[in-house]
Amino acid sequence: MAHILLALANKDGAVTLSYGLFINSVWFAFILVKGINRIKDAESKQVGKATKNCQFCYSVINIKASKWPQSTANLR
């Protein structure tokens, strides 16, 4: 109902202050950026958990590895 009244007021040439539209636009942008950042954080955490540092040579290896890739040394 309110949008019909706003359209009629604009049609008649009345000056209207549509601050609600501005607030909704800013809120939508905030929620959008927050969601994108949450997705990026989740992706970076998954990548970080897939690897570990070797305790002997400090190289980055798969988290599931039980032996060092270049030799048969046990990692556990």
Image: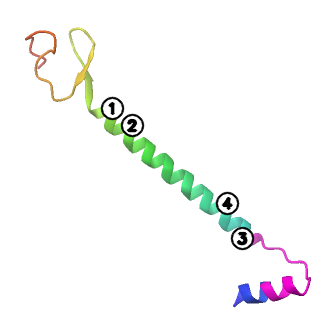
**Mark 1 or 3, nearer chain start:** 3
Whether 4 is drawn above or below 40: the answer is below
Cβ–Cβ under 8 Å for marks 1 and 2: yes
Q: Which residues are magenta?
A: 7-19
The residue at the point 13 percent across, 17 percent down is 75
Location of residue 70 in the rendering, given as x and y in whole percent from the top left corner = 16, 10
Q: Amino acid at mark 1?
A: Gly
Mark 3 residue element: helix
Q: Which residue is mark 3?
A: 21
Q: Secondary structure at mark 1?
A: helix
Q: Residue at x 27, y 14 (%)?
A: 59
Amino acid found under the numbered disc labelled 4: Val
Distance between the alpha carbons at the discs numbered 3 and 2:
35 Å
Amino acid carrying mark 2 in the image: Ser
Neighbour tally class for label 2: few under 14, some 14-19, many 20 plus, Cα within 10 Å? few
Under circle 4, the secondary element is helix
> To which residue does mark 1 refer?
48
